[in-house]
Image (cartoon, rainbow, N blue to C red):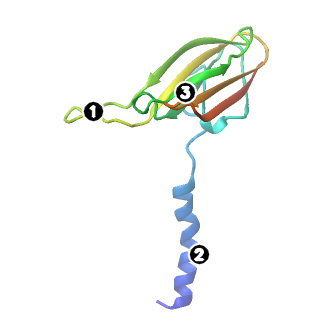
Amino acid sequence: MTARLARCLVVLALPAALACVATPGPAVAAAPAGTTVVTQARSGDVVTIARGRTLELRLTACLASCGFRYETVRRPDPSVLRFRSSRVETPEQPQDGPPVVGGSSTKVVRYRATGRGTTRLALRLVGPDGTVDQRFRLTVRVR
């Protein structure tokens, strides 16, 4: 293979290889009908949903097994967006062997769009020593 052909192959193959590695996950994941799912990738964004729909936040981090937790620092206006539930989803533990420590979990917070308007919400990820590791902010418009 000549040096010129090798350079051409590298130039052509490099963007394809980088696309496989650098492609971020979806900002809005698949959801049941009537639900809009938002992940960390949308932090700082404005999301518009219809009245009556459910907004589901899915924030992934090393939570309980690492000592991290999400705290709500700004609650949305309940006349626009009402809190419904909050839970932590953890990956399944192996059946054969010791439990896995330090794996990522997902904080799932669900709200119901109750009235027209705009509101904001914010959560922060707090480490075991009390320092803030991440912040998540979202503006929600209900039409």
- Check whether the beta carbons of the residues at disc 1 and disc 2 lie within 8 A of each other: no
Q: Nearer the viewer, mark 3 or mark 1?
A: 1
Q: Which one is earlier in the sequence, the residue at label 3 or at label 1?
A: 3
Residue type at tag 3: Ala
Q: How many labels sit on residues?
A: 3
Q: Secondary structure at mark 1?
A: loop
To which residue does mark 2 refer?
A: 11
Q: Is residue 51 above or below residue 16?
A: above
To which residue does mark 3 refer?
A: 31
Q: Position of residue 63 (x, y in %)?
A: 46, 30
Q: Is residue 89 above or below residue 20?
A: above
> 43 or 127: which is nearer to us?
127
Using the rendered view, name the quadrant where residue 67 is placed.
top left
The residue located at (60%, 19%) in the rendering is 34
Q: Position of residue 45 (x, y in %)?
A: 73, 34
- Check whether the beta carbons of the residues at disc 3 and disc 2 lie within 8 A of each other: no
> 85 or 31: which is nearer to us?
85
How would you rate the neighbour count of disc 3 (Cα within 10 Å): few for under 14, some for 14-19, many for 20 or more? few
Q: Is 36 left, or right, of 61 in this rendering?
A: right
Q: Is 100 left, or right, of 121 in this rendering?
A: left
Q: Position of residue 57 (x, y in %)?
A: 59, 26
Residue type at tag 2: Val
The residue located at (54%, 76%) in the rendering is 10
Q: Is residue 111 above or below residue 103?
A: above
